[in-house]
């Protein structure tokens, strides 16, 4: 029996059309003692590879039972990763299977026929797994975006660093890439960096605060209680006052700090909240003032209990700011003016937030979709676009769509926008297909069908009327568009949304896999059903 090698082209077709199985058809086996292989046995799977090992052992292709046992043990271990949908790990451990084959082959402990056959079967399995959506890979991309890079506020170095990372990822898959730069409005930086550990704390703007130069003010933290006159001593001079909300007004706290010679004020909340306090002074201060949460204020107090804490406080407006869109394109060969399918997300975040779910999860998902679609046979032009500056008003996506040439607009078929797909928040177990007008469209139809084909619980699918994401400019331009997100049954979002708690620890790989399985199935099926070349061939036949 000989199994031919399966390239990415065929595997993509089969995975795209079924998302299950991978069926090698060309089989010939050298031992006449073995019974004929049935159609069910031709599906490439760990189970059938185990059956193949049994058959090879029976036909004496191994030198001993110990060799057979070692090979079976290794494949069983790989099967655990396959069953848990950890495809990246399955591929890694299957690749180490080749090392085992090399060892036994060099020692003459397996036949040449068995060696070739098992390598071909391993090739087929790897080709199969390599075209399946893998949340392990998504978590790798997400770790880079939300942990290694962190907050990606429009116009900042963090956002630009993320753009470079994404472009490199797309290029590694073989896509043609470009960076589309555009101007954004002035950005006000509010930074409180604790110099002892080099950590920045989430801040809220205080109306009426003065500003600083680009370097800000630097000094030790002075604990001033509630900011009453008696809470300040001569030691407050030249320091940044930390005061708690309560009893007297914000303005009175700031005035008392100013009179004591403080160079800045940080007011922390007296109630628990995931968002920083935003004090309204109702007057104009001569020193910089910011607010923060009770949690973060108390964290500074905890550090003060151990000794001096130094900090740098900046409130500074940056002019002449730019952001950028990251564009990756795969054009079909020998197709003139192909229709365009867009798969998009935004990669920027709100200030102080690592943006793991919003929208690191969506951006990491489109990177994974780009990976599994890189060799997909289609007559469509695939465009993966990661938009910048979404959080300040859909600036990147509006700029992109507004600057599409008319010929591109005429060729534009559909937009699949990924937004917040991985919240661990228990009620956020529903996949919402958001359309601007709340009406079903083609993206909804294919998602609805994907639920049926994959046997998913239809109660977990909702059609929702919502804008507020990058599908809006496409819809407004007359392009079919939908935004996908995981949320609650009534369209709600997790409490960590737009806070500094939007971290990778609050991401569920299982939710990412759930959403990724469905969305990738919907996109695969859409591309197959709208393949004009395939239709022409069918009509011609």
Image (cartoon, helix red, strand yellow):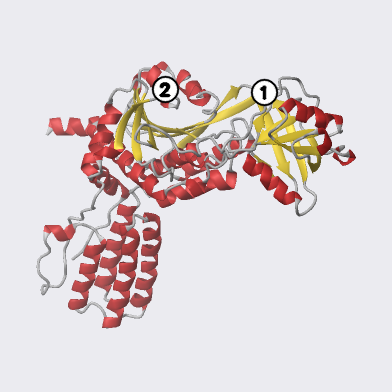
Depth check, front residue: 284 or 504: 284
Give residue 430's position: percent from left, percent from top: 34, 38
11 lies left or right of 347: left
399 lies left or right of 318: left
Q: Quadrant of residue 435?
A: top left
Identify the secondary structure beneath mark 1.
loop
The C terminus is located in which quarter? Answer: top left
Q: Residues within 10 Å of mark 2 (few under 14, many from 20)?
A: many
Q: Which residue is mark 2?
A: 472
Q: Which residue is mark 1?
A: 320
Give residue 158's position: percent from left, percent from top: 61, 38
155 lies left or right of 311: left
Q: Quadrant of residue 183?
A: top right
Q: Is residue 37 above or below residue 66?
A: above
Identify the secondary structure beneath mark 2.
helix
The N terminus is located in which quarter? Answer: bottom left
Q: Residue at x 30, y 41 (%)?
A: 518
Give residue 151's position: percent from left, percent from top: 59, 39
Task: Kindly check if marks 1 and 2 are in contact, taking CB atoms under 8 A apart as contact.
Answer: no
Asked if residue 141 shows in the view, the reply is: yes
Q: Is residue 104 above or below residue 291?
A: below
Asked if residue 215 shows in the view, the reply is: no
Give residue 8's position: percent from left, percent from top: 32, 49
Depth check, front residue: 518 or 206: 206
Sequence order check, earlier mark of 1 and 2: 1
205 lies left or right of 446: right
Q: Is residue 101 above or below residue 348?
A: below
Depth check, front residue: 182 or 376: 182
């Amino acid at each position: 029996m000989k199994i031919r090698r399966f390239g990415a082209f065929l595997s993509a077709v089969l995975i795209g059309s079924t998302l299950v199985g991978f069926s090698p058809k060309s089989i010939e086996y050298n031992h006449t003692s073995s019974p004929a292989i049935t159609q069910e046995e031709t599906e490439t799977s760990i189970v059938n590879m185990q059956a193949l090992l049994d058959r090879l052992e029976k036909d004496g292709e191994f030198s001993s039972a110990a060799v057979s046992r070692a090979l079976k043990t290794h494949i069983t271990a790989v099967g655990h990763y396959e069953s848990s949908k950890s495809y990246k790990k399955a591929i890694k451990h299957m690749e180490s299977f080749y090392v085992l084959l090399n060892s036994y082959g060099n020692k003459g402990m397996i036949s040449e026929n068995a060696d070739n056959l098992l390598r071909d079967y391993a090739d087929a399995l790897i080709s199969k797994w390599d075209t399946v959506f893998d949340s392990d890979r998504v978590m790798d991309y997400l770790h880079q975006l939300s942990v290694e890079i962190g907050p990606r506020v429009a116009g900042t170095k963090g956002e630009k660093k993320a753009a470079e990372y994404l472009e490199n990822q797309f290029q590694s898959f073989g896509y043609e890439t470009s960076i589309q730069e555009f101007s954004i409005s002035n950005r006000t930086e509010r930074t409180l960096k604790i110099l002892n550990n080099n950590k920045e704390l989430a801040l809220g703007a205080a109306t009426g605060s003065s500003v600083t130069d680009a370097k800000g003010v630097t000094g030790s933290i002075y604990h001033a209680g509630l900011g009453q006159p008696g809470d300040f001593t001569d030691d407050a001079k030249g320091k940044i006052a930390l005061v708690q909300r309560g009893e007297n007004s914000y303005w009175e706290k700031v005035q008392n700090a100013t009179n004591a010679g403080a160079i800045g004020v940080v007011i922390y909340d007296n109630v628990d909240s995931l968002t920083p306090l935003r004090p309204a002074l109702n007057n104009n201060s001569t020193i910089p003032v910011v607010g923060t949460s009770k949690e973060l204020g108390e964290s500074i107090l905890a550090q003060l209990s151990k000794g001096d804490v130094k900090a740098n406080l900046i409130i500074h407006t940056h002019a002449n700011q730019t952001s950028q869109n990251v564009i990756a394109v795969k054009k079909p060969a020998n197709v003139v003016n192909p229709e365009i399918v867009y798969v998009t997300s935004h990669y920027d975040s709100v200030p102080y937030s690592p943006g793991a779910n919003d929208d690191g999860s969506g951006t990491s998902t489109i990177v994974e979709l780009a990976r599994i679609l890189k060799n997909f046979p289609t007559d469509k032009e695939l465009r993966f676009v990661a938009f910048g500056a979404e959080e300040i008003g859909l600036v990147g996506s509006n700029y992109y769509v507004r600057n599409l040439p008319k010929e591109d607009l005429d060729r534009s078929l559909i937009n699949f926008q990924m937004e917040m797909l991985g919240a661990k928040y228990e009620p956020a177990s529903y996949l919402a297909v958001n359309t601007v007008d709340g009406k079903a469209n083609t993206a909804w139809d294919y998602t609805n069908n994907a639920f049926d084909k994959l046997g998913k619980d239809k109660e977990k699918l909702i059609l929702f009327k919502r804008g507020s994401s990058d599908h809006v400019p496409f819809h407004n331009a007359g392009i079919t568009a939908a935004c996908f997100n995981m949320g609650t049954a009534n369209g709600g979002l997790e409490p960590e949304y737009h806070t500094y708690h939007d971290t990778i620890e609050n991401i569920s790989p299982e939710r990412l896999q759930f959403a990724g399985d469905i969305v990738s199935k919907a996109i695969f099926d859409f591309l197959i059903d709208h393949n004009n070349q395939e239709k022409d061939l069918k009509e011609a036949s």
